[in-house]
Image (cartoon, grey):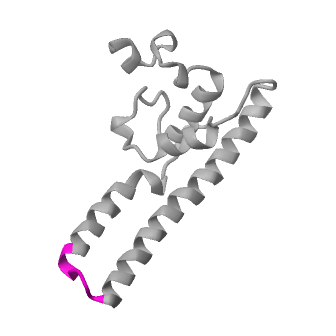
Amino acid sequence: MEAMRKGEEWALPVKDRGPVKALARDYVDSRRIMVSEYILFAIFLLIIAVFIVGHGKNSSSYVVLLIEIGIVAIIALESVYHGLRVSRLAKERFPGQSTKGITWYVCKRAVKLRSSRIPPARVARGQAI
């Protein structure tokens, strides 16, 4: 477990191994701002809003629903955008390597807070990849 936390390739689960996945992790970790990383805070505020607004009020329930749909849309759009960029970058750097599932991998990595990502970030925010 300690070796996995250090990011040693041999200790990583199969889903995290390989140069394409390493590139995806480095890409996500190097981004200064990814909205998906802070979505957890938006969801927390939304839960508070649901209790404050109350249930059964049609207009307020509709607003909460729109916010929920907006959160999902933001995560989806950002994930597809960054997933396509990582896929294109991986095809340039590692021709012949599979990029299957890379968008989902980027999405899962991006929605986690930086401090809770395993394997941990190897690059600093803003560092060129």
Residue 3 vertical position relative to residue 22 in the rendered view, above or below: above
The residue most toward the top is 10
Indicate yes or no whether the magenta region holds residue 102: no
Q: At which x and y percent is residue 80?
A: 63, 52
The N terminus, quarter of image? top left
Q: Which region of the structure is painted magenta?
A: 51-57
Q: Which residue is located at x 61 percent, y 37 percent?
A: 128
Q: Nearer the viewer, residue 55 or 73?
A: 55
Q: Judge whether 82 appears above or below 86 on screen.
A: below
x and y, in percent, of residue 107 in the image: 53, 45
Q: Which of 55 and 93 lies nearest the eye of the viewer?
A: 55
Q: Looking at the rendering, which quadrant does residue 18 occupy?
A: top right
Q: Residue 37 at what x, y percent from top left? A: 42, 50
Which residue shows up at 51% across the image and 14% down it? Answer: 9
**In the displayed structure image, the side of residue 104 where residue 64 appears, left or right:** left
- State left or right for residue 86 relative to residue 42: right
From the viewer's perspective, tell me whether residue 111 is left or right of residue 18: left
Q: From the viewer's perspective, is residue 37 above or below residue 64?
A: above
Residue 79 point in image, percent of width and height: 57, 51
